[in-house]
Image: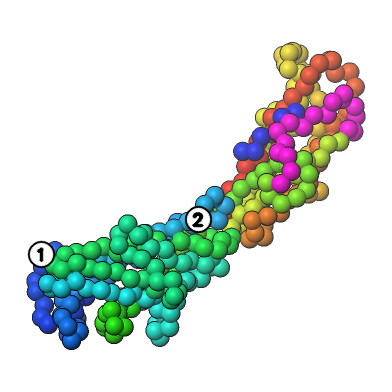
Amino acid sequence: MSVKSTPARLRGWGPKSLGTAGLLLAGLLAFASPAAACDLAVETPAAVRIEYNPFAVGASSGPVDVLFQNRSDTACELRLLLVDDVGDPLPAVTLGGAVVGFRPREASGLFRRDTEPGAFVLTVAPNSTTRAEMDAVVLHDAVVEAGQYQGDLRLLIRSADGVPVPPPVPLRVILQSTPRAQVNIAGASGAFGSGSSVEVIDFGQAATGVTRRAFLQVRANTKATVSIRSEHHGVMRHLEMEEAGSVVAYQLELDGDPVDLTRVWTRSLDPPRTLAGVDFPLDFTLGTIAGQMSGRYEDLITIDITPN
């Protein structure tokens, strides 16, 4: 028998505001150093969205792009710092148990300040526009319950001499954990993916009551439904002479629960929210062997899992 598992808003600071096509300037405040004025406008970025799959290989991330416009004849040397709503440094945010940090894309001219967590440096050339680019990256994985989680930070902008340029730019990070469930059939009990996968349950020489055991490994970030379907509705048919009608019946139990193979059988599961998941014994038992034709008999079982 074979088994298969199957419009942007800009905030400006400077001596005066200037209308710019396609950009909305608001909240203008004076910002100048004794040496020179830095006439700066900053675009409020769109919310950062991370499509998170806890079972995927590699880190999940979402892009963060902040547009800086320098309208003066002097370069703006900036210090950027991610802070919480009271102004304390916040280099990372926890969403649903997953820790999200921020990594600069240095090709954009944004660099990390190693001496200050969550801090970056950026130079905006005179009379130019610069896009500071970084990635919000899941640094520490967790099997986050399916749903949407969000956190709000602020990007504090300082001059080269450390003077804050008010107001900070709001930054919202959204982590979307899509409902997911996975199933695997293994030859031994263990964490998900451990041990050898099983595709064939071989009874060998058929005899009444012969048993075989495998394990159904399951992991999910939500409740799930497992379904089991038998191609021949609970019997194995003769491979070479199927028309003769010779069959071998068998029974299947999932974690001690009899599976009705005459129909599509389903069971609700609520696995732990871990990468290891949980496993359940799959017990196969041959029925009566008496008078069947000699030869090889097979059935195909399909096991699926669907997140609820």
Whether residue 64 is visible here, answered yes or no, is no
Q: Position of residue 44 (x, y in %)?
A: 27, 70
Give residue 134's mark: none
Residue 167 in the figure: left or right of residue 275? left
Q: Residue at x 43, y 76 (%)?
A: 116
Above or below: residue 156 compared with residue 303: below
Residue 264 in the figure: left or right of residue 106? right
Above or below: residue 85 compared with residue 110: below
Q: Position of residue 249 (x, y in %)?
A: 81, 29
**Magenta stretch, residue numbers:** 194-210
Q: Residue at x 77, y 40 (%)?
A: 187
Mark 2 or mark 1, earlier in chain: 1
The Cα atoms of the two marked residues, 2 and 1, are separated by: 38 Å
Give, as a three-letter code, the residue at label 1.
Answer: Ala
Give SS at disc 1: loop
From the viewer's side, name the closer residue of 138 and 274. Answer: 138
Above or below: residue 298 compared with residue 175: above
| Location of mark 2 (residue) | 59
| Location of mark 1 (residue) | 21
Give SS at disc 2: loop
Mark count: 2
Residue 18 in the figure: left or right of residue 86? left
Quarter of the image holding residue 152? bottom left
Give, as a three-letter code, the residue at label 2.
Answer: Ala
